[in-house]
Image (cartoon, coloured by chain):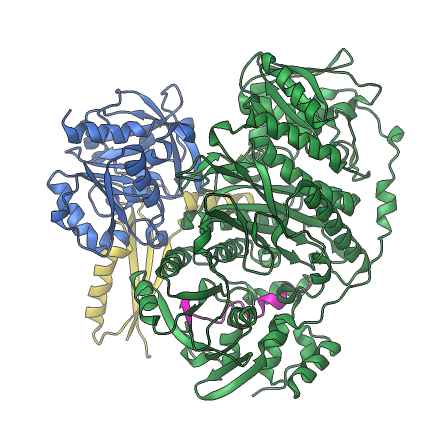
Chain colours: A yellow, B green, C blue
Amino acid sequence: MFLAKVYITYKKGVLDPQGSTVKKALGTMGFDTIEDVRVGKYMEIMLEEKEKDVAEQKIKEMCDKVLTNPVIEEYSYDILEVRK
Amino acid sequence: MGKKVDYRELGLTDKEYQLIVETLGREPNDLELEMYGVMWSEHCSYKNSKPMLKRFPTRGKRVIQGPGENAGIVDIDDGQAVVMKIESHNHPSAIEPYQGAATGVGGIIRDIFTMGARPIALLDSLRFGELKSERVKHLFSGVVSGIADYGNCMGIPTVGGEVYFESCYTDNPLVNAMCVGIVNKKDIVRGKASGVGNPVMIVGALTGRDGIHGASFASEELSEDSEEKRPAVQVGDPFMEKLLLEACLEILKSGCVVGIQDLGAAGLTSASCETASRAGNGIELDVSLVPRREEGMTPREVMLSESQERMLVIVKKGRENEIEEIFRKWDLAAVTIGRVTDDGFLRVKDGDRVVAELPVKSLAEGAPTTVNESKQPAYIKDVQRIQYDQIPVPEDFNEVFLKLLASENICSREWIYRQYDHMVRTNTLVLPGADAAVLRIKGTKKGIALTTDCNGRYCYLNPLEGGRIAVAEAARNLVCVGAEPLAATDCLNFGNPKKPGVYWQFENCIEGMSQACEALNTPVISGNVSFYNESKEKAVYPTPVVGMVGLIRDINKIVTPGFKKEGDLIAVIGENHGGLDGSEYLRVIHGRVAGNPSIDLEKEKAVQKCCLEATKQGILNSAHDVSEGGLLINIAESCIKGGVGARIELDSEGKRWDEVLFGEAQSRIVVSLSEHNCKLLEKISEQVGCKVLIIGKVAGKKLIARVDGSTLVKQDVAEISRKWRERIKCLME
Amino acid sequence: MKFGVVMFPGSNCDVDCFHVIKEVLKEEVEYIWHKEPLRESKRYDCIILPGGFSYGDYLRPGAIARFSNVMEGIIDFAEKGGLVLGICNGFQVLLEAGLLPGAMKRNKNLRFICDNVFVRVENNTIPFTLKCKKGQVLEIPIAHGDGNYHIDKKTLKEMKENNQIVFRYCDEKGEVSEATNPNGSIDNIAGICNRRGNVLGMMPHPERCSEEILGSADGKLIFDSIMKYLKGE
């Protein structure tokens, strides 16, 4: 069994309205060393697979096909082996 | 099993516990006691309010269903009826504004389609503290987003409502949601478990641990600990509810359904015992059959869960397959969990084991009602007494006017309703921002007008008169758009009813509302009571919100508040006297909440009759009722909405000038009309016995107000329009 | 002429589109259920993907709906030159399905916006805008939380060269500026078409302004254009 942690954000260069709003808010609260904020999505996906390679391949496919929109989003992931 | 449940912790009194033991002839077990605890909470049983609510007039020739069902129903001719109800979600919204408001909207929508009606409109009556602190802004912003996201996703337009900002609501915001539906009279369904042997099904979302004891939570004052009770707040899933809505309307059409009820407060416990009680039957359920979202749930958790977007359906025996089929189409679960019995008991089983067995009548309707001690609170005398000679008449009326126009309680609500989809279903003919919203009924010439109203400050100063005014203003708003008021729904928001002063407010508001409902022929067909809106010894203003529906026979004769044509005359229907008592002017300019507002219902009736008849004859180009801010603010709003100026010429008749311009005396409607129609308006007013006074003309680009020959206010309409529109945005962003 | 209105779970402007076709245009119209593959035998002249919140807008607006059974047939229908109109959520589905270029982001102010706005017709040569004048200003409602259109610079340039920008947010005089951009869309874009011009996606709702009693009938120009094209007038 594998747990995939998938992180999705807007691509670099795509204006992120949530990110800029949060950045501005943090700035007014006195957090003045903030360079950049990007708001994204985090997903946990449990896969009933035996091989890590297979799990990874499936996660990649899901990300490319459904979970992200490649026009505006990019993703990264961690895959951990877990017990049921 | 853990330690025995203490009935006192469930909010039951010694006397109530004794009654339960007597009724059962034995001690209840823990689950049974918890079921009693939620069903006999104020939120479910109305034990503190029932005797008072009997005062409301609830009958009328158009009333098809009065209070007692999931929602009220009123006849609008041609075999059609309007279904409506308003309900509070104050406590959950104070703790988690977004989800609290969202699930409030979800709950009231279910109450409407439970009756077989298609929900066509939402309204929201909101109260917050003054928009100064970050906390209030957070609550306000969260509540508005919660309402928006839920209603928008459902595809039900949010067409109206109201919002006030007053310091008494800082810790206890009020979130009252109203839903309105349309049904063909022959398709009305009720929440009854009829027909012994009929299967009982649970449909919609899976059952989780969320919201356990929400009903009890709503029956306590908020305290420091309330934050820790967060698990009692449920999460809404509007997409699930949209599917549930479509699936339920489809099964209701199929003819397989005997009765249906949503699982709201107290979840499966209340839905099962209330449907059984209405039909005089019993129900037997097996909790092990209930589809669950989480593993290891106990019978207690299943019976008390307040997971959203679920319904209980009582089906004609042998037709379960058809129900399952329809729900499958919408990718939803529909599972038989029990059947209707004839023994009058709610029997809960976990597999073969009976875990609770309670008489439904006692559980659903047996909570002993109380008439609490009632006493006029000491503050009343202090606030009602006001010496006007100590309140200076302002020197610069322009400054006062601009300050008032920018008051949070007067400025435009655009920032709010722009976040609500108010046009979906393409029926909204008069958009938010007018006296009342108007929706067409497709396929007919008819329309309905909707509004919610309540000035809590008036109710605080004089609960009896405040209650009368709330009803009168709602009806007046409907009349302004050309609708005949038909029926009311109410949401009574008060503090702790065990306090004699609060109970006195409650009693008097109800008395006042009842008098006005009788006078204006608008019976109360549904409603909701929310007590314990207080914290740290401070209660909210008594806030009995009135939702009202009116009928428009010809949608081509709708009237809106904006001035339409230069050269039109401006007239006041009603007596143009002042009355600064309880006014926004006193609060904003002089920092006073004082006076003794009042209304003459006979005069009110005549004014409404006059305006309604004038709209029917099609002689009015605009109509707008005088409310917060008084006459000049009213005229400014009509200028702004029409994008045109006005010249007003008033005679003070010896009254103070601030009173003439900013007084909030009731029973006044400002209209504009062409000069040659004035004769007709005067004729109508003579027939119904009310006054009409011409006070000015629609003209130019400026609003100019003169009193006794002196120009007191002169403002550019485009300029004041911008200030009025952007006020809330400026405060929020 | 025969119209089809697709019903995804969570669609809610389906009834409004249906109403306009049936009661205003007085043309034949039927619902197409998302689970059914699109049957060619139905011989639709135009398919509308309506507004709403298909699958609750969960994940991304339109992201799940585009995998519905019905979509394969719609892509095929579009490739053969059939008219496909995506409104609001329907537009988002078309973007996710790759029938139109680009993607939608949250509105710049992060709030849902329901309002009457003005759009300028930039391309009046496609079947959906035949009856409009180039530069004509339409008053038309928007109602969305994710209408902030995004496309990379290179593709935007190509789209302009191919005349694929159909509507841009403007003021009542037709001036396009930052101040008239309600949601942050790149270049004030409110609607675009594919190269061939038979697939149109637009955020504004023409079905909400096709009757005078609703305050504006400008949206009817879109439906009238479709009829004119289909009838070959």
Q: Is residue B269 above or below residue A31?
A: below
Quarter of the picture containing the C terminus of chain B is top right
- The answer to whether residue C134 of the structure is visible from this angle is yes
Foreground residue among B41 and B186: B186
Q: Position of residue B454 (x, y in %)?
A: 67, 43
Q: Position of residue B146 (x, y in %)?
A: 50, 51
- The answer to whether residue B142 of the structure is visible from this angle is no
Quarter of the picture containing the N terminus of chain B is bottom right
Say which residue appears at 63% left-offset and 52% top-offset: B59
Foreground residue among C214 and B182: B182
Q: Position of residue B75 (x, y in %)?
A: 52, 47
Q: Is residue B336 above or below residue C147?
A: below
Most common SS among magenta residues: loop
Q: Residue C52 vs residue C93: left or right?
A: right
Q: Residue B652 vs residue B236: left or right?
A: right
User: Where on the picture, by quarter, is residue B694?
Assistant: top right
Q: Residue A18 vs residue B602: left or right?
A: left
Q: Is residue B666 above or below residue B109?
A: above
- Residue B217 among those drawn in magenta: yes
Q: Position of residue A74 (x, y in %)?
A: 28, 51
Foreground residue among C122 and B450: B450
Q: Is residue A16 above or below residue C117?
A: below
Q: Residue B565 vs residue B697: left or right?
A: left
Range of residues picked out in magenta: B201-220
Foreground residue among A47 and B488: B488
Q: How many marks?
A: 0
- Residue B146 among those drawn in magenta: no
